[in-house]
Amino acid sequence: MQTVQDAAALRAVIRGWRGQGLTVGFVPTMGNLHAGHHSLIKLARARADRVVASVFVNPTQFGPNEDFERYPRTLVQDQVGLAEQECDLLFAPDVTTLYPFGAEQSVSIHVPLLTETLEGAHRPGHFDGVATVVCKLFNLVQPDLAVFGQKDFQQLKVIERMVRDLSLPVKIMGAATLRADDGLALSSRNQYLSPEQRALAPQIYATLQQMRDLIAKGHAWPVVEQAAASKLARAGFEPDYAAIRRVEDLSEPGEGETEGLVALIAARLGTTRLIDNLPFD
Ligand SMILES: Nc1ncnc2c1ncn2[C@@H]1O[C@H](COP(=O)(O)OP(=O)(O)OP(=O)(O)O)[C@@H](O)[C@H]1O
Ligand SMILES: CC(C)(CO)[C@@H](O)C(=O)[O-]
Ligand code: BAL
């Protein structure tokens, strides 16, 4: 597997593949890759002739008090994992390739409404950073398809919306969330957890399952949300939200609505913020 850092080298490889009539699948990441990311590569492999992954810790999607500085950067280890997954090309740009005028002076993409709730409400500006960098990466890689994890459920929705609204010529695919045996969704941020916090963390997924079961039994969604947040707080989490929303657009369900819903949780254990979700069908 080849690694390229600059746009010209990336374009040269892609042009070569295009010349041979090959299709390109793309998996954008922030690195520190785990089996969840590898499953995305596998899906891209199955659907495209060549697979490009990117590793870039995008400054514009982190708030001022978030973990941009301490986010784990493990490029050599990531290269080994990607090569094992038969990824064809790693694009690992530096910040000036993606932000030639500096991050503060960048054109910014804002997806309205969908980004005002849940993660967007708790991480102001986060999805502008995500949409902007993903659009820039799509323009550089020009993939036929791109794979995103359902673990970042709202992110997947935001990207789908951006692609449709801007008529970007890329097919977006969602990949199922990979979990540890105890249910905890794999995430680069799990390694911030102390052993005690790691033992508590699977309660997020257990709570999502309980939320699903309570809705199936006919409980009202605002009551289910309240019960989930209280349970997490009692267990030692600081929940940002425990929400039941429509899969379609993450809007609030109507009274008695039980179809096409998803439960989503964001909760902090100490300084580590974890997110997870469970679509009901
Ligand atoms: N457990 C998982 N299963 C499937 N896909 C995942 C999983 N974790 C992350 N992804 C997906 O991998 C892509 C890159 O995510 P990212 O690099 O932020 O990894 P992460 O482990 O989620 O890190 P973070 O700690 O930032 O949440 C995203 O599309 C994300 O949804
Ligand atoms: C899509 C992404 C790579 C954009 O920086 C990031 O938000 C992520 O890793 O999910
Ligand atoms: N996985 C989403 C990227 C972020 O948390 O910033």
Image (cartoon, rainbow, N blue to C red):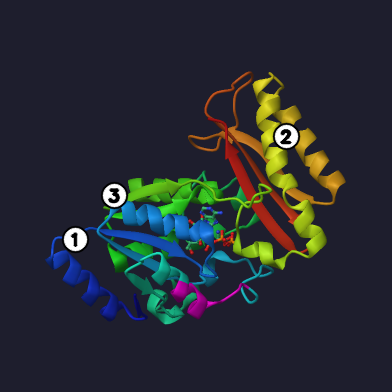
The answer to whether residue 5 is above or below residue 246 is: below
Picture mark count? 3
Mark 2 or mark 3: name the one nearer the start of the chain: 3
Q: Which mark is residue 167?
A: 3
Q: Position of residue 189 (x, y in %)?
A: 65, 63
Dot 3 or dot 1, earlier in sequence: 1
Q: Residues within 10 Å of mark 1 (few under 14, many from 20)?
A: some
Q: Which residues are magenta?
A: 71-80
Residue pointed to by mark 1: 22
Q: Position of residue 192 (x, y in %)?
A: 71, 67
Q: Amino acid at mark 1?
A: Leu
Q: Quadrant of residue 123?
A: bottom right
Q: Quadrant of the N terminus?
A: bottom left
- Is the residue marked by circle 3 packed among few (<14), some (14-19), or many (20+) residues within 10 Å? few
Instruction: Specify whether 83 is left or right of 267.
Output: left
The residue tagged with tag 1: helix, strand or loop? Answer: loop
Q: Which residue is mark 2?
A: 225
Q: Categorize mark 2 by other alpha carbons within 10 Å: few (<14), some (14-19), many (20+).
A: many
Instruction: Residue at the far right: name it.
Output: 234
Tell which tag, 2 or 3, sits nearer the viewer. Answer: 2
Residue 17 pos. (x, y %): 19, 67
Query: Which of the pair 35/205 is nearer the observer?
Result: 35
Q: Amino acid at mark 2?
A: Glu
Q: Amino acid at mark 3?
A: Ser
Nearer to the camera, 186 or 26: 186
Position of residue 255 relative to residue 33, above or below, is above
Camera-nearest residue between 46 and 214: 46
Residue 275 painted magenta: no
